[in-house]
Amino acid sequence: MTRGYPAPDGGFVDLADPMLHASGDPHAAWRWFRENAPVHWSVRPTGTAYWSVTTYAETSQVLGDGALFSSAQGIRLEAETEAVAAASGKLLIVTDAPRHGKIRRIIGSAFTARTVRRLEHTMQRTVAELLEKALVKEECDLAQVAARLPVAVICDLLGVPREDWEFMLEHTRVAFESMEGNGTAGKDAIASHTEILLYYADLAEKRRRDPRDDVISALVHGTVDGTPLTDEEVYLNCDGLISGGNETTRHAMVGGVLAFAREPEQWRRLRAEPELIDSAVEEVLRWTTPGTHILRTATRDTELGGQRIEKGQSVVAWIPSANRDAQVFADPDRFRPDRRANRHLALGLGGHYCLGSALARAELRSFLAELARRVETVERVGPVRRVPSHHISGFEYAPVRLVRAAGGEESKGDRAMTAKLPERCAYDFVVDGLGVGGVALVGEGVEWSYEELDRRVCVLAGVLRGRGVGPEVRVGVCLGRGVDVVVAVLAVWRAGGVAVPLDPGYPVGRLGFMVDDAAPALVVTSGRWVDRLPVGCGVLRVEDVDWAGGVPFGGDAGVVPANAAYVVYTSGSTGRPKGVVVPHRGLGAVVTEQRRRFGIQVRDRVLSFSSPSFDAWIFELLLTFAAGATLCALPWPEPDLVRLAEHLRTTRVTVAMFPPAALSVLEDEHLPDLRIVMVTGEVCPPAVARRWAAERAFFNCYGPTETTIWAACHGPHRGQVGTSVPIGTPVAGTRVYVLDGAGRQVPHGVAGELCVGGSVVSRGYGGRPGLTAERFVPDPFATEPGARMYRTGDRAWWGEDGQLHFGGRLDRQVQIRGFRVEPAEVEHRLRALPGVDEAAVVAYGSAGETGGVRLAAFVLLAEPGSGRQERLAAALAAELPAHMVPETIAPLDELPRAVNGKIDREALSTMAAQHARTAGAASGQEDRPATDTERVLIEIWQEIFERDGLGVAADFFGMGGHSLLAARCAARIRTRLAVEFPPRAIYDTPVLRDQAAAIDNLGHAPVRTIRRASRARFVRD
């Protein structure tokens, strides 16, 4: 027999001695045994005897064979306390099958994927708050910083009210000591543990009367073979979850950060390559292995590691030792965050595999990801004090210095210079999802796996290759929202071509211009849209593809990152839309930053909300497929904001991106699955951010199409929103500068033009060399030859908080419901119309007010009546997308001029705003409602327009209404009047009196199909 193990000096060391584990390096002892006596008989000084198991293979056998090695029987390595004695046979961890499995299923009913997604919000919010406080002084006790995260998460899971979380934090550690039985806390520990059990008793009684979706409710109302769990089983299992779960997760977090502090190069690599976060989590678990051992009892005679184990003898499997076994892990004593196929045993194995493993991983992932985002360097600044326990490899005190990563420093190119970005092409990221994902795409009645999506993409790619598509060959994609457009764009990329999205809802004239300008080899479309394309344009109908029998393309497309990936058209000031040519190179930076910022997982479901002609749609594709998540396509050709909330619920969307204007009218209640919300395309009003950041991770994304979708991002917001919403810090692959008129960087707090350099800068405007040279200029701050930067024309400044703040445009470009609009292009179109001598188009309103940003046109007519406003609006609607058609078109005798003779656009904006405040309402003030429907409609209109005194002659669009407000109005009509009155019906009945009559005619009949009218409304003659 061996007492302990032979030490180098000839003495013996006790493997179960708490002080050995507190020393921080029991690995030398375990290594000796793995090599010399992997399974050996140990006798403690107290007389307790057991078999010690130190190797991976034998430990796996002990953990995995619950029939041979029982959890319900066995010794304690320390004397039992009253609390431990009471727990015998009642805690989940000390029961065997089949009872163990039945209790596990009861608790597991609250550990659903949906619950984990919901708790991820708690994790992200808590981590952000903890780190923000820790970074104030730089030096902190990491053991204390990390303590709050697992307590918050487990309290949320259990159903403990938020106001009691501090109580649980205070008492959990002491209660753990009483469960340890190490005597360090004595009577105080027992008293504290008793107090917590009494608390659980009170909370359990409340859940009996009022069950919730939490663990305590599941235990209280659960049964095993028809018999309810005893009160002791309920209380002790709750306590086991919060005390054991808290200690193990907290110490894994601390141990992982300390490991990175010892390996600064590995920390720099994790910051530069956020895609390593998942493998880093697994390596942290292997390296730290917070739970040190598992106790089992042999149920019959057996052999283990060459030793004969007799029935009834106890076995102690030392998990940290197994996780350093060189037979399984290459270079096991080295911390390697990029370690692949990491089959560690830190979370157990077999029937007793850690029930909270998904939560533990999610907590570690949230903590490390946020730390990597915020912290440049981690340094240990003093001796670490470990917990004197053989149960937990933990930390009582861990002093570290956390050096904040300053956003202002990133503006000088830090990320672009230090981060190694993947040199890959767009479809490569879909292949990433193919390796890990399950369901790839849902919508229009289909649900395709990644394998099925890849097969269909490759079939269409084969057809495209047969039509000559390859690198730098452009392919138009004229398909509406849905699954077909996803397959088509991916197929163009798989074939090596350049995707040119064409919105089939655009006017025929604009589609014709885009096709002529882009000169695609062919256009992928459907029979529904063929007639909208120019005559003679080569087309490929998706209905004509042999999806079942076609030969998939499986070869190398020959595309490289420098090749173009897509061309997206934006509004042009000369009256011609301009096509931005974006290479694959910048998409690697986009995916890198998406992974860093958002942490999208395989189980996430991402909404495809944006129009395919908008580069945010490509952002949604990459966000989803690079993570192996599921893309949820909208079931309507145009977003139906009335039914959108219901769609989000039924499809269980967890991640979505919207323009702020859409969020302002979308109801945020009863969306339990939605955990991440992003906004883009226009200035985000603080009220929108405040409302949506209250219960979710909220991100404000900024960036022009010319810099590969985005350039900066702020978030996650945690409900703390000031008077403005910053656009954040630069994303991967960018160098962001704020420059004065002479091209010099300005100090913090001083506004200038926002310019973006780095690998994300696109080629420029196709076929527009002059304009490209004007906006894409040499980057004077870059070190690589030939580097360019894009002059955005946006006004911005660096705040003292290290965040970029947006200050509007330096030119006349505006953002309307997420789309970039050049008023000069609308002016150009108006002047070209018969009967118009002069035209001026101005923007008025703001994203934060009812109606948002809108356009107003003022025209000088050649002859009175020669260009009636209705005719002008119809002509514009035939050439321009709906968001570019002015809300009002007003004839003037002359345009106001400033002293220098230029058109006074500020005066015109004031006129447009004044008109919006009075139009449609003034005449209605004397028109009293005559029916109940009219009275209800007046209430609804006054709510959505935030105006009093409306009458039945009020005009919806005359007061500044638009599609988003129409959606809000339709939703409230449905709620108040129990009638389906779709947003498109409001276009046909913009006057309140007419709208009320139409509703009365409908009654409770099904929704009618009502023709969509032009969005433009007119000033009356």
Image (cartoon, rainbow, N blue to C red):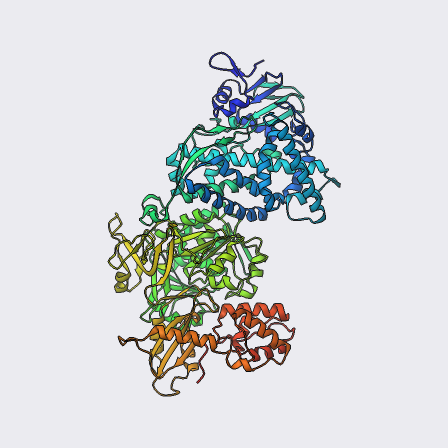
Snapshot quadrant of residue 236: top right
829 or 169: nearer the viewer = 169
Q: Position of residue 829 (x, y in %)?
A: 35, 75
Q: Which residue lies most toward the top here?
A: 10
Quadrant (top left, top right, bottom left, bottom right) of the N terminus? top right
698 or 380: nearer the viewer = 380
Snapshot quadrant of residue 764: bottom left
- 987 on left or right of 790: right
- 872 on left or right of 95: left
597 or 203: nearer the viewer = 203
| Residue 883, above or below 94 | below
Is residue 546 among what the camera can see? no
Q: Position of residue 51 (x, y in %)?
A: 59, 20
Quadrant (top left, top right, bottom left, bottom right) of the C terminus? bottom left
Q: Position of residue 918 (x, y in %)?
A: 47, 77
All told, the count of numbered labels is 0
Q: What residue is rendered at 54% in x and 71% in y?
A: 983
| Residue 437, above or below 962 | above
Q: Position of residue 675 (x, y in %)?
A: 53, 52
